[in-house]
C-alpha cells in the first residue's frame, strides 16, 4: 500500500512532536521545605538595649537623656561615680540590638546581630558595641552581643549645614557578634507526631501534601487537619531516625493550587496576574480623555507720547481630545493567562489603565479572580 505524500509528511511531523515531548523534563512542583514549616522548628527573636562608643563626634546629643542615663549607670556598675550633668555623649550612641536565635542552636555558637540607633546620632561608623544581653519574649537572656560595627555607609557634614551621606549610616551589623548563652530545649525524639504548617493555607494544597507524603514514605502516615495543617504520625521504628524522616519529607515535591488573584500597585502602575485568572466574554470600550489648558498673557503697549497705559490681558486656550476607540469584544470565554494578555494588548491597554479596566470588569461580574490593591 502506498501512502499519499501529504499523509507521509503528517506522520513525520507527529513523530517529531512525540520525540520532543518525550525529551521534555517532567514538571515538578515546589518542595515541602519551601512552602511549609515544622511546628517547633523556627527562629526566635532576641532584643536588647546597649551603647555604641568610639564615635567621632557623631553620637547622640546632650538632649538624649536615655543615653546619658545609660552611660552613668554603666560607669556606676564599673565603680566610677559621676553625675549626669558631667557626661558628654558626643562619641556615644544609644542603640537597639536585635538578633534571631535559630532552632537547635547550642550554647557557645555565635549569631549575627543588627544594631540600630534610637537617638539623634548621625552615624555609627567606627563604633564599638559594648556588652549587651539579648532577651527573648520570656524576658530571659539567651545571648550576649559585643564587638565592632560594620556600617557600609558614611555621613559627613560641614559647619555651614551642608553635607554628604552614603547608604544608611545609623544601622550596622556585627557578623557573629553574639554568643549564645542559653539553649531552647526541644527534643525531636519526644514527638509523637510531626505537625506541618503551610505558609499559605489552602485545602487543596493540604490534601496534595498529605497524599505526596504518603506516597513518598510508602505508608499512610500523613493526614490533613485543616487548610493549613498536616499531621504526620511517627511510628516507633522511625523515632530514632527523626532527622532522616524530616529530611525525606522536606524534599517531597508538591504541585500547589494557587488562588486566582490580580495584584494592582496604584503608586507604580504595576499589575501582576496569577496563572489561574479567568475572564468571561465581555465587551470593552476603552479610551482616554485628555484636557490641556494653556494660559498666556497679552501685553498691550500704548503709542509713544500718548496718555495710554500698558495693559495685560490673560488669554486661555483649552484643548480637549478623546480617543475614538470602538467597542471591542474580549472573547476569552474563561481562557488561560496567555490568551487574556493577548486580548488586552489587542485593545491597547497600558499597564496603568489596566487597574481601571480590571476594576470595571470585576464590577461587571466577568472577572473570576480576587483584586488586591497595594
Image (cartoon, helix red, strand yellow):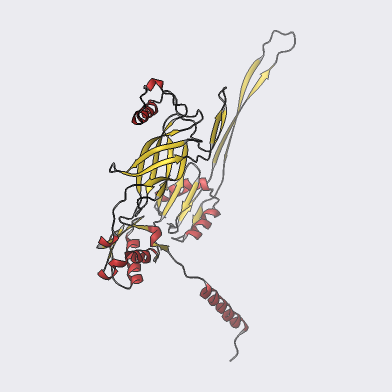
Residue 96 at what x, y percent from top left? 39, 37
The residue under the point 36% across, 70% down is 216
Q: Which quarter of the figure has residue 242?
A: bottom left
Query: Is 157 drawn above or below residue 284 in the view shown?
Result: above
Q: Which quarter of the figure has residue 249?
A: bottom left
The residue under the point 48% across, 49% down is 271
Query: Is 268 drawn above or below residue 217 in the view shown?
Result: above
Residue 184 versus residue 204: which sits nearer the camera? 184
Q: Quadrant of the C terminus?
A: top left
Residue 4 at what x, y percent from top left? 61, 85
Q: Is residue 257 visible?
A: no
Q: Quadrant of the N terminus?
A: bottom right
The residue under the point 49% across, 55% down is 329
Residue 294 versus residue 169: which sits nearer the camera? 169
The residue under the point 54% across, 54% down is 345
Residue 1 versus residue 245: which sits nearer the camera? 245
Amino acid at each position: 500500500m502506498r501512502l499519499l505524500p501529504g499523509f507521509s509528511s503528517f506522520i513525520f511531523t507527529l513523530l517529531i512532536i512525540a520525540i520532543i515531548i518525550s525529551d521534555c523534563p517532567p514538571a515538578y512542583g515546589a518542595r515541602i521545605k519551601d512552602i511549609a514549616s515544622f511546628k517547633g522548628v523556627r527562629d526566635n527573636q532576641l532584643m536588647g538595649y546597649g551603647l555604641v562608643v568610639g564615635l567621632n563626634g557623631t553620637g547622640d546629643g546632650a538632649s538624649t537623656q536615655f543615653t546619658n542615663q545609660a552611660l552613668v549607670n554603666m560607669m556606676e556598675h564599673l565603680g566610677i561615680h559621676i553625675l549626669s550633668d558631667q557626661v558628654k555623649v558626643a562619641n556615644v550612641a544609644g542603640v537597639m540590638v536585635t538578633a534571631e536565635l535559630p532552632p537547635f542552636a547550642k550554647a557557645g555558637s555565635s549569631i549575627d546581630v543588627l544594631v540600630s540607633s534610637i537617638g539623634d546620632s548621625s552615624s555609627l561608623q567606627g563604633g564599638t558595641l559594648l556588652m549587651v544581653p539579648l532577651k527573648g519574649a520570656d524576658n530571659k537572656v539567651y545571648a550576649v552581643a559585643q564587638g565592632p560595627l560594620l556600617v557600609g555607609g558614611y555621613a559627613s557634614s560641614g559647619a555651614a549645614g551642608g553635607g554628604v551621606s552614603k547608604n544608611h549610616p545609623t544601622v550596622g551589623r556585627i557578623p557573629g557578634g553574639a554568643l549564645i548563652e542559653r539553649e531552647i530545649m526541644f527534643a525531636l525524639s519526644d514527638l509523637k507526631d510531626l505537625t506541618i504548617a503551610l505558609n499559605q493555607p489552602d485545602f487543596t494544597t493540604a490534601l496534595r501534601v498529605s497524599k505526596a507524603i504518603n506516597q513518598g514514605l510508602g505508608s499512610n502516615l500523613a493526614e490533613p487537619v485543616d487548610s493549613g495543617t498536616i499531621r504526620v504520625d511517627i511510628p516507633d521504628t522511625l523515632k530514632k531516625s527523626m532527622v532522616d524522616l524530616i529530611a525525606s519529607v522536606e524534599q517531597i515535591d508538591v504541585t500547589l493550587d494557587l488562588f486566582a488573584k490580580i495584584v494592582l500597585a496604584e503608586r507604580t502602575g504595576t499589575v501582576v496576574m496569577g496563572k489561574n485568572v479567568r475572564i468571561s466574554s465581555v465587551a470593552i470600550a476603552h479610551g482616554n480623555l485628555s484636557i490641556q489648558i494653556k494660559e498666556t498673557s497679552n501685553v498691550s503697549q500704548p503709542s509713544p507720547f500718548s496718555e495710554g497705559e500698558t495693559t495685560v490681558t490673560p488669554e486661555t486656550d483649552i484643548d480637549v481630545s478623546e480617543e475614538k476607540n470602538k467597542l471591542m469584544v474580549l472573547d476569552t470565554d474563561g481562557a488561560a493567562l496567555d490568551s487574556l494578555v493577548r486580548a488586552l494588548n489587542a485593545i491597547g491597554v497600558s499597564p496603568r489603565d489596566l487597574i481601571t479596566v480590571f476594576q470595571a470588569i470585576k464590577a461587571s461580574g466577568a472577572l473570576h479572580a480576587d483584586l488586591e490593591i497595594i
